[in-house]
Amino acid sequence: ILQQLTLAQQEIAWDQTNKIRFGLPPIIGNYFFPKIAPQLIAAGLMPQLQTVEAGSAALLNQIKQGDLDFALLGASGPLQEPDLTISQIGTAPFVIITPESDPLAQKDKVRFAELAMQKFVTLSEAFVHTRAFTWFQQQSAFIPNVVYQTGDVQLLKQMVAQNVGIGFLTNLAINPDDHLAAVKLTDPKQPVFTISIVRRKDRVLTPAMQHFNQILAAN
């Protein structure tokens, strides 16, 4: 109870600044934020936005601790947290990415088990991709040869483009100017990348936060 009171006092003090603390993972940010930016500007909310960029796992902890008001979070399946209000707004598949010149790029789809001889470049554990990658590994009964892990999505794509290894990403992270091929995974009952708006249930929203929440939910 004491912790809840302290958190409530901190949030009351924060609300006096008229700012909105918004957690945004890099992949979702690059895909989603440009869509809502014009609406935020039109509503006069952009100057009030204080954006925090990190992986979804790290941002989830910040939401729970009261360090963020909202976050757009990715997960490897439906997100479930009893103390949070969660609104799922989209899904996307996980795919294998390769250079366009790689023989694997000529395939439309592949089973993960067919990749046992490949080298992988993967995202670090701050990203939800780790859990999904582990699922594919367990289903395929081999330990992938991960030659490099990074917390930088752009660096991962550049390393794949330079033939360091193949990558494992949600297809939301792939842009035409990356010049990479995305190969579908055919494993049954595989996890999908979900996108959700997340906030604490006991967070009292200011009028600006309510308006911000409406804009997020409408997209």
Image: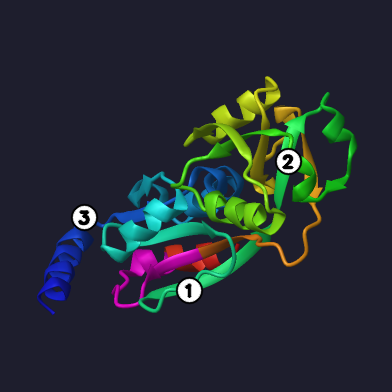
Question: Is the residue 95 above or below the residue 66 in the image?
Answer: above
Q: Quadrant of residue 67?
A: bottom left
- Residue identified by numbered label 2: 116
Task: Please name the residue shown 73% across and 67% down the image.
Answer: 189
Task: Please name the residue shown 58% across and 50% down the image.
Answer: 32
Provide the secondary structure element on which disc 3 rests: loop
Question: What type is the residue that disc 3 sits on?
Answer: Thr
Question: Is the residue 66 above or below the residue 108 in the image?
Answer: below
| Residue 46: % across, % down | 41, 48
Q: Earlier in the sequence, mark 2 or mark 1?
A: 1
Q: Is residue 195 left or right of residue 163?
A: left
Give the quarter of the figure containing the C terminus.
bottom right
The residue stretch that appears in magenta: 197-211
Q: Nearer the viewer, residue 195 or 141?
A: 141
| Residue 180: % across, % down | 75, 31
Rounded to the nearest angstrom, the CA distance separating label 1 from label 3 is 31 Å
- Residue identified by numbered label 3: 17
- Residue identified by numbered label 1: 80
Question: What type is the residue that disc 1 sits on?
Answer: Gln
Question: What type is the residue that disc 2 sits on?
Answer: Ala
Task: Please name the residue shown 76% across and 49% down the image.
Answer: 113
